[in-house]
Image: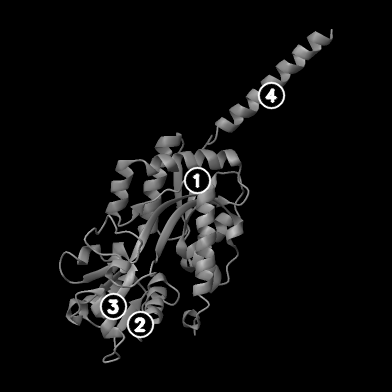
Amino acid sequence: MLTKFTRLAATAIALASGAVAAAQAAYPERAVKIIVPFGAGGNTDLIARVTADFLSKDLGQPFIIENRGGGGGSVGAGIAAAAEADGYTLLFGTAGSISINPYLHKVKYALKDFTPISNAAESSILIVVNPKLGVETLKELIALTSSGKQQINFASGGVGTTAHVAGVLYNEMTDSNMVHIPYKGAGEVINDLIAGRVQVNMNNIPSFLPHLPTGELKALAVARKTRSALLPDVPTTKEAGLDNFVLGSWYGLMGPAGIPQEAVDVLFKGMKALGESPEASEKFKSLGVELTVDASPAAFAEYLNEQSEWWGKVLQNPAFKKK
């Protein structure tokens, strides 16, 4: 009798375990929404759509982009942080929305309110000048801006943007005094940079790509540890004479805090496949970013913590406080 009972119990446990495993393996059972905290058509949106299309094909369910712009990315990020933690609402986060905004604005979220899944892409800062400035290398620019012989203006899309941070850090590291000229948008910056109304801009690579082959703008260095595959002939800042000047933006997939581990595992598996796709790599390059998938969700979490700590220290500078 005991043997029969034991067999029945074992069978029941096995069936229950199988049911749990099947339920876990079923994710995603329906469409997954990815909130992009910026408007449609921008670079973040386009990168997110390439990612979503790949995940849709790889995981067998639609991954649908929902644009929720506003507040420099803080509106959409806040909506994602407050969403149900079931793995069916995700966020395509960025350096601005996650690493920077909590230090500059009153937002309704913090890094702890998200579950990191994987980085997707990175874009590095490129130091660009108007050719009429007459400098051919970064060393020549440093010599000019640190001499105090003439006023040199650098442009940004506003206080606290990566372009503004880059200019302030450059001033501090080179004992220069370039004057910050804030603009409302990247388009205005490029127009005035080409026209010579500002002389220097340090911003993400994509905004400059159409204007480098034409000679309208000149690239001096890329602020990363290794050369960019997008501009292999442009030296790194270290190679060009400015050490420890590494700065850029990241784009990555996240969920609200507490989403099921099985969802994290499945999503990361899809992201890992994305990272190994030559087709995806080429699509990302066409958007001016480099495909970068972390070794694990834990590695992405560590990177986000490092970024948050670094930006927290940098943004204590009074130059980044809105007047």
Residue 42 in view in this figure? no
> Which of the two discs, 1 and 3, labels the residue nearer the N terminus?
3
Neighbours of disc 4 within 10 Å: few (<14), some (14-19), many (20+): few
| Most distant residue in the left direction | 214
Amino acid type for the residue under numbered disc 1: Ser
Q: Are marks 3 and 2 in contact (CB under 8 Å)?
A: no
201 with respect to 33 (left or right): left
| Most distant residue in the right direction | 1
Residue 212 in view in this figure? yes
Circle 3 or circle 4, nearest the eye = 3
Neighbours of disc 3 within 10 Å: few (<14), some (14-19), many (20+): many
- Relative image position of residue 17 (x, y in whole percent): 66, 25
Neighbours of disc 1 within 10 Å: few (<14), some (14-19), many (20+): some
Q: Distance of mark 4 from mark 1, alpha carbons?
A: 30 Å
Q: Which element carries disc 4, helix, strand or loop?
A: helix
The residue wearing badge 1 is 296
- Relative image position of residue 123 (x, y in whole percent): 36, 60
Front residue of 71/268: it is 268
Q: Distance of mark 1 from mark 3, alpha carbons?
A: 38 Å
The residue wearing badge 3 is 200
The residue wearing badge 4 is 16
> Which of the two discs, 2 and 4, labels the residue nearer the N terminus?
4
> Which of the two discs, 2 and 1, labels the residue nearer the N terminus?
2
243 with respect to 21 (left or right): left
The residue wearing badge 2 is 181
Amino acid type for the residue under numbered disc 3: Val
> Which of the two discs, 4 and 1, labels the residue nearer the N terminus?
4
Q: Which element carries disc 1, helix, strand or loop?
A: loop
Q: Distance of mark 2 from mark 1, alpha carbons?
A: 40 Å
Relative to 82, is 263 above or below?
above
> Which of the two discs, 3 and 4, labels the residue nearer the N terminus?
4
- Relative image position of residue 69 (x, y in whole percent): 46, 62
